[in-house]
């Protein structure tokens, strides 16, 4: 699918399920949940999965700082080189992996992504983490869980559970990348492959 | 990107910038506790070295191993080549063994092109230096070193527009010079070749660069000065009277280096002949990037191997960074 919202008649089929305010509220709630479950956020490291996961991780870090008064390390974890479908598409550009501080050994790593779907991205992220160190625990925060898991993976913090059919598309837009905040539910128009 | 990497001239600006950007990420892997990625697991790469090489062969091997590829090293010495086997038969042997890519170094210009286009072998071919023709990964690592030093370490997406690069010495026998002229021109840099008239190749006026015979005139206007080794092993005639005269006119010493702008760097593809084209004082100064170039070589070769072999086909560069699509989550 395109990263742009279709501007033609298909635009009618695209329906926002979360608006900017909803996203802000949801992130605040997730931040509180992280603090609650981690009993503070002393050893939390937030790692966003490029592209939009990184922006979400930064926003979460800001909220955590508001709540706890302490700075929370935030970075990014690119999973391109660990994907299981690399050989199904032309070689892709790789994103940035930025590990804050010295390492992630003994820390509580919270992975942050925008949409949880098949779970394959998270599987790749867990492999990537294994090469970077040995966290005390790894948790997962996502803005939207749209179901259709293909691996035994679940999220610890979910912004919104969004039951979808495979014919629907879920698109997260964020100010930093797309100029506005929204989660859009649309209909698949092209018979594109699922994964 | 094309399927093979035979010449630096095969690369478009977008291809080259994508390789440099990818290498920037690969360079960060060298700082990790586990310097390995699973990306090329199960792929076999053959390093076919018909000509002596230390740093290029080791660099390719390190890059292949960091990407988890299986590596077969082939050196002409001690192989069937010394019994008279042809390139064709060697290639077909490799094809029968099922290699996924071939890295080739050959003393004959055009050998990689022949290997890639003759139909002897199906795998992508990467040129690791052929005769006096091309050495594209060297040009890429040089451009990467220049971009890091002159533009900045996080210059993602940027080229070398307007940078003035001077290449000094044995241009005639240098595949490094040819590759660099092609690639630097593609990246928007202005290249000047400086050499004795006898070491300037015929037809240089059609190259996208300037030619000068006076090093001292060019030095103050250079952002990077690349010194080339005088390739005695390829010389079958007297190209200059004496070594002393060559080094006095075209060698880089401390006094000459002082004429360069403050930010300018000194590069050398190696191996250096100290006292000939470069003095020890210059070679050991912190403006000289020789060691950095070697380290960057591994990152660049990882990037090239990943972009050529990492997917079902080479990376597509209509857009510089393909956004992760919704389906692929």
Image (cartoon, coloured by chain):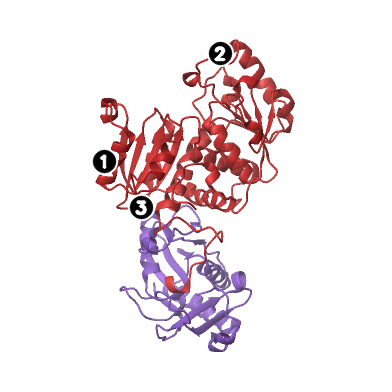
Chain colours: A purple, B red
The answer to whether B201 appears left or right of A146 in the picture is right
Residue A156 location, x and y as percent? 40, 75
Q: Secondary structure at mark 2?
A: loop
Density class for disc 2 (Cα within 10 Å; few <14, some 14-19, many ≥20) is: few
Q: Is residue A135 visible?
A: no
First reached walking from the N terminus: tag 3 or tag 1:
3
Mark 1 vs mark 2: same chain?
Answer: yes
Can you identify the residue that label 3 sits on? B40
In the rendered image of this protein, does residue A162 appear above or below residue B135?
below
Q: Which mark is residue B7?
A: none
The answer to whether B242 appears left or right of B35 in the picture is right
Q: CA distance from mark 1 to mark 2?
A: 41 Å
Mark 2 vs mark 3: same chain?
Answer: yes
Q: Say which chain tag 1 marks.
A: B
Image quarter in which the C terminus of chain B is found: bottom left
Please name which of the two marks, 3 or 1, marks the residue nearer to the observer: 1
Q: Secondary structure at mark 1?
A: helix
The answer to whether B172 appears left or right of A86 in the picture is right
First reached walking from the N terminus: tag 1 or tag 2:
1
Q: Say which chain tag 3 marks.
A: B
- At 42% from the left and 84% from the top, the residue drawn is A167
Q: CA distance from mark 2 to mark 3?
A: 47 Å
Q: Which mark is residue B93?
A: 1
Density class for disc 1 (Cα within 10 Å; few <14, some 14-19, many ≥20) is: some
Can you identify the residue that label 2 sits on? B238
In the rendered image of this protein, does residue A181 appear above or below residue B92?
below
- At 49% from the left and 26% from the top, the residue drawn is B271
Residue B135 location, x and y as percent? 49, 36
Q: Nearer the viewer, residue B9 or A150?
A: B9
Q: For residue B108, which quarter of the picture? A: top left
């Amino acid at each position: 699918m395109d990263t742009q919202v279709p501007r033609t008649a298909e635009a009618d089929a695209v329906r926002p399920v979360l608006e900017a305010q909803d996203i802000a509220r949801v992130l605040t709630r997730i931040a509180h949940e992280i603090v609650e479950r981690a009993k503070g956020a002393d050893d939390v490291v937030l790692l966003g999965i490029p592209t939009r996961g990184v922006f979400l991780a930064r926003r979460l870090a800001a909220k955590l700082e508001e709540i706890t008064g302490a700075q929370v390390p935030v970075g990014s974890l690119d999973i391109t080189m660990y994907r299981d479908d690399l050989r199904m598409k032309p070689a892709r550009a790789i994103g940035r992996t930025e590990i804050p501080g010295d390492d992630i050994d003994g820390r509580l790593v919270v992975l942050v992504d925008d949409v949880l779907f098949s779970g394959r991205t998270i599987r790749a992220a867990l492999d990537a983490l294994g090469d970077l160190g040995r966290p005390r625990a790894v948790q997962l925060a996502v803005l939207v869980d749209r179901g259709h898991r293909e691996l035994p993976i679940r999220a610890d913090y979910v912004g919104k559970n969004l039951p979808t059919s495979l014919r629907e598309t879920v698109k997260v837009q964020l100010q930093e990348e797309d100029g506005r905040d929204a989660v859009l539910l649309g209909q698949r128009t092209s018979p594109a492959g699922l994964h | 990107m094309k399927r093979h990497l035979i010449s630096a001239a095969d690369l478009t600006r977008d291809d080259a910038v994508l390789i440099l950007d990818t290498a920037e990420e690969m360079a960060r892997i060298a700082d990790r506790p586990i310097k390995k990625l699973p990306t090329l697991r199960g792929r076999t790469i053959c390093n076919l070295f018909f000509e002596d090489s230390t740093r290029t062969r080791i660099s390719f091997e390190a890059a292949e191993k960091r990407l988890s590829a299986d590596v077969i090293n082939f050196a002409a010495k001690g192989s069937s080549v010394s019994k008279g086997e042809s390139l064709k038969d060697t290639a077909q042997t490799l094809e029968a063994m099922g290699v996924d890519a071939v890295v080739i170094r050959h003393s004959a210009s055009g050998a990689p092109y022949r290997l890639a286009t003759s139909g002897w072998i199906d795998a992508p071919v990467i040129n690791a230096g052929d005769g006096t023709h091309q050495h594209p990964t060297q040009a890429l690592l040089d451009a990467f070193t220049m971009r890091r030093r002159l533009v900045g370490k996080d210059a993602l997406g940027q080229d070398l527009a307007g940078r003035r690069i001077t290449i000094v010495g044995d241009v005639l026998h240098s595949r490094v010079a040819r590759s660099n002229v092609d690639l630097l021109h593609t990246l928007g840099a202005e290249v000047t070749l400086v050499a004795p008239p006898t070491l300037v190749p015929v037809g240089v006026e059609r190259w996208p660069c300037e030619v000068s015979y006076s090093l001292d005139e060019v030095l103050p206007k250079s952002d990077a000065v690349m010194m080339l080794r005088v390739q005695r092993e390829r010389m079958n005639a007297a190209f200059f009277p004496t070594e002393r005269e060559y080094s006095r006119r075209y060698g880089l010493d401390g006094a000459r280096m002082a004429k360069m702008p403050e930010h300018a760097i000194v590069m050398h593809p190696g191996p250096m002949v100290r006292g000939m084209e470069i003095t020890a004082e210059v070679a050991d100064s912190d403006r000289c990037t020789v060691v950095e170039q070697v380290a960057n070589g591994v990152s660049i070769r990882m990037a090239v191997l990943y972009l050529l072999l990492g997917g079902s086909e080479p990376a597509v560069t209509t857009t510089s960074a393909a956004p992760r699509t919704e389906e692929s989550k």
